[in-house]
Image: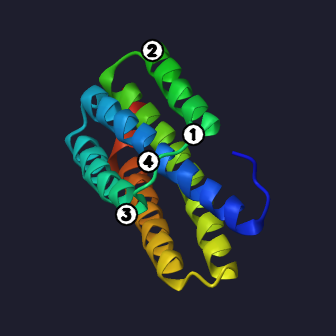
Amino acid sequence: MQIKNFKDMYIAELQELANMESQIDIALKRMADASSHPSLKRELLRHRAETKEQSKRLKLRGHTDQAMEALVNETQKMLSLLEGDDLRDAGLVASAQKLEHYEIAAYGTAAALAGQLDLRDDQRMLHDSLEEERKADAALTKLAKGEVNQDAAAA
């Protein structure tokens, strides 16, 4: 698709978000399956359910988001290098936060574009997803600082 105007750019961003959410859904399932820490597994599965809802909100199909694909591939590569449950869990948190930070940037960009186009309903929907991503990131930070990283450091 050739992008010829600002609205086309916004639509391309939405398509990218839709694809990104489907990639994250798969990654979160793999990460939850690989985690041994019960709180981490719960948080990854909780966010996976939230991701499915975000994807439904977008209702679009788009091209493959290559940056997200690279982040997901890096997660798989990193997991293959880490030995032991505690260290793997700490690596999972770090990888999940990289994914969250990318989503935060993507939703923030799309929400700003929607605002510029005076698409208030879209802007609110995107802002809601942005806030969910920020909360997921905060929950991962809390898990890392409170439990997971301490366990990995002690192992």
> Disc 3 to disc 4, how far (Cα)?
11 Å
Whichever of callouts 4 and 2 sits on the residue coming sooner in the sequence is 4
Q: Which mark is residue 21?
A: 4
Does the image show residue 151? no
Q: Earlier in the sequence, mark 3 or mark 4?
A: 4
Would residue 152 be found to the left or right of residue 70 on screen? left
Instruction: Please give the residue where the numbered disc 1 appears in the rendered image.
Output: 63
The image's mark for residue 57 is 3
Residue topped by disc 2 = 80
Do the residues bearing badges 4 and 2 touch, measured as CB atoms within 8 Å? no
Earlier in the chain: of badge 1 and badge 2, it is 1
Q: Residue at x 75, y 67 (%)?
A: 6
Lower sequence index among marks 4 and 1: 4
* Label 4, label 2: how far apart the Cα atoms are: 23 Å
Measure the C-alpha gap from mark 1 to mark 2. Answer: 28 Å
Image position, residue 104 (x, y; %): 56, 59
Q: What is the three-letter code of the residue carrying label 2?
A: Ser
Question: Could you tell me the amino acid type at mark 4?
Answer: Glu
Instruction: Give whichever of discs 1 and 3 has the lower sequence position.
Output: 3
